Image: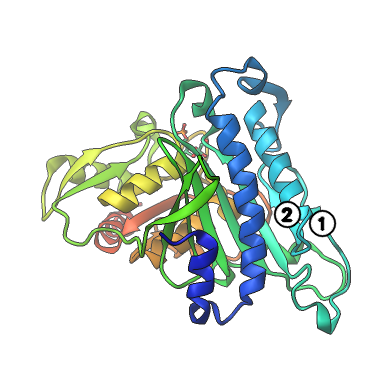
């Protein structure tokens, strides 16, 4: 059974673009933080102090849950202590956080090279009702050579060197890609180690029953193309029959659809005219994974990874899944107003 560290070392050649040590340090931070969050999530129901709202309204105007704040602080601390990340942008913080602004000296090729964008705990409205939640992370090489600035964070998704998520569900699984396929590692809490459990994850090919995941409560306000796609799914025309599954947690819905086959859609709605999901730390990493798993991800028209970000917390409509199903939705979108 490969541990995550052994898998990285064993696949040395496939990470040739980035130093193995850098990746091991990045994952050392991510694993440590995710184990601490796993522990809290798994006893959330028992200790009043960790469930419920923190009383803070975050930058998104959303009621921050105590576990959101805990996850945010835990990741910041774990990245700070390994001298590998120079800046972090988090859903829970208005501005990006400079971890280390030291000028890159030649010999410091390792240090402070990496930029992390993170949704520390996605789907947190599900915490108090015991439904799967997750952390989503996206990593880039810094562009600045002196002062870190916002351009380090506003990079297109196709410049990501690492993206992934941790799902805190019936088990805690870390799923990532460095551009060489998608791999999943399940935490064995008894030894505190992540073991390879899902090698080369990809959307199932030619599966006759597919899933479509969308909040149909917003149906009335969906763009016409989305309404037509939903009706297409319900009419069970074409090669596939569809079943609806939606748990209101992007990581949970994405993970299930990646394994069982299905499309995830969050279009623009009346309440979110630009879409609800954030481009930098939700859509870009999930789009990177979707493409690495043989699928595609768009805003209904444009490839997500090609979108040039303008703001840290900007939102976008988002659809991802198997190529033929996403293409069908894009066809409806193209032929509608
Ligand atoms: P709605 C969670 O807040 C999230 O960002 C995603 O994880 C999830 O898919 C979506 O929003 C749920 O939004 O409007 O359907 O409750």
Disc 1 + disc 2, Cβ < 8 Å: yes
Q: Residue 331's image quarter? A: bottom left
Residue 179 visible at all: yes
Residue 292 - label = none
User: Is residue 307 found left or right of 237 in the rendered image?
Assistant: right
Q: Which marked residue is nearer to the observer: mark 1 or mark 2?
A: 2
Which residue in the rendered view is the most extreme toward the front?
191
Q: Return the x and y of residue 86 as percentages of the image width and height.
A: 78, 62
Q: Residue 328's image quarter? A: bottom left
User: Is residue 306 found left or right of 292 in the rendered image?
Assistant: right
CA distance separating discs 1 and 2:
8 Å
The residue lying at 78 percent from left, 48 percent from top is: 95
- Work out whether residue 232 or residue 212 is closer to the camera in this orientation and state it: 212
The residue lying at 37 percent from left, 34 percent from top is: 215
- Work out whether residue 276 or residue 136 is closer to the camera in this orientation and state it: 136
User: Is residue 122 found left or right of 294 in the rendered image?
Assistant: right
Number of dots carrying numbers: 2
- Disc 2 target residue: 79
Query: Which mark sits nearer the N-terminus, 1 or 2?
Result: 2
Quarter of the image where the N terminus is located: bottom left
Q: Is residue 181 above or below residue 168?
A: below
Q: Return the x and y of residue 283 as percentages of the image width and height.
A: 51, 54
The residue lying at 17 percent from left, 55 percent from top is: 207
Q: Return the x and y of residue 211 as percentages of the image width and height.
A: 25, 44
* Way the structure is coloured: rainbow
- Disc 1 target residue: 99
The residue lying at 43 percent from left, 39 percent from top is: 171
Whether disc 1's CB lies below 8 Å from ligand 1 is answered no
Q: Residue 44's image quarter? A: top right
Q: Return the x and y of residue 286 as percentages of the image width and height.
A: 47, 55
Helix, strand or loop at disc 1? loop
């Amino acid at each position: 059974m490969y541990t995550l560290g052994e898998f990285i070392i064993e696949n040395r050649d496939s990470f040739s673009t980035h130093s193995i040590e850098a990746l091991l340090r990045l994952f050392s931070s991510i694993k440590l933080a995710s184990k601490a969050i796993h522990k809290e999530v798994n006893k959330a129901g028992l200790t009043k102090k960790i469930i419920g709202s923190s009383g803070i309204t975050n930058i998104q105007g959303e009621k921050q849950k105590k576990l959101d704040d805990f996850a945010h602080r835990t990741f910041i601390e774990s990245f700070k202590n390994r001298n590998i990340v120079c800046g972090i942008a988090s859903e829970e913080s208005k501005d990006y956080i400079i971890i280390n602004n030291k000028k890159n000296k030649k010999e410091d090729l390792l240090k402070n090279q990496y930029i992390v964008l993170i949704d520390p705990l996605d789907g947190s409205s599900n915490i108090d009702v015991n439904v799967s939640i997750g952390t989503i992370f996206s990593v880039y090489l810094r562009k600045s050579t002196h002062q870190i600035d916002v351009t380090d964070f506003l990079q297109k998704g196709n410049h990501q060197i690492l993206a992934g998520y941790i799902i805190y569900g019936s088990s805690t699984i870390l799923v990532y890609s460095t551009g060489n396929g998608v791999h999943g590692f399940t935490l064995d809490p008894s030894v505190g180690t992540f073991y390879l459990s899902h090698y080369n994850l990809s959307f199932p090919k030619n599966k006759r029953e597919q899933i479509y995941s969308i909040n149909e409560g917003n149906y009335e306000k969906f763009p016409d193309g989305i309404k037509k796609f939903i009706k297409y799914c319900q009419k069970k025309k074409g090669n596939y029959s569809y079943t609806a599954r939606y748990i209101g947690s992007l990581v949970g819905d994405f993970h299930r659809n990646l394994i069982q086959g299905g499309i995830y859609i969050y279009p623009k709605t009346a309440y979110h005219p630009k879409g609800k999901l954030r481009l930098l730390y939700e859509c870009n990493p999930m789009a990177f994974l979707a493409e690495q798993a043989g699928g595609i991800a768009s805003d209904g028209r444009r490839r997500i990874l090609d979108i040039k970000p303008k703001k840290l917390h900007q939102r976008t409509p988002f659809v991802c899944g198997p190529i033929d199903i996403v293409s069908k939705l894009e066809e409806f979108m193209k032929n509608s107003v």
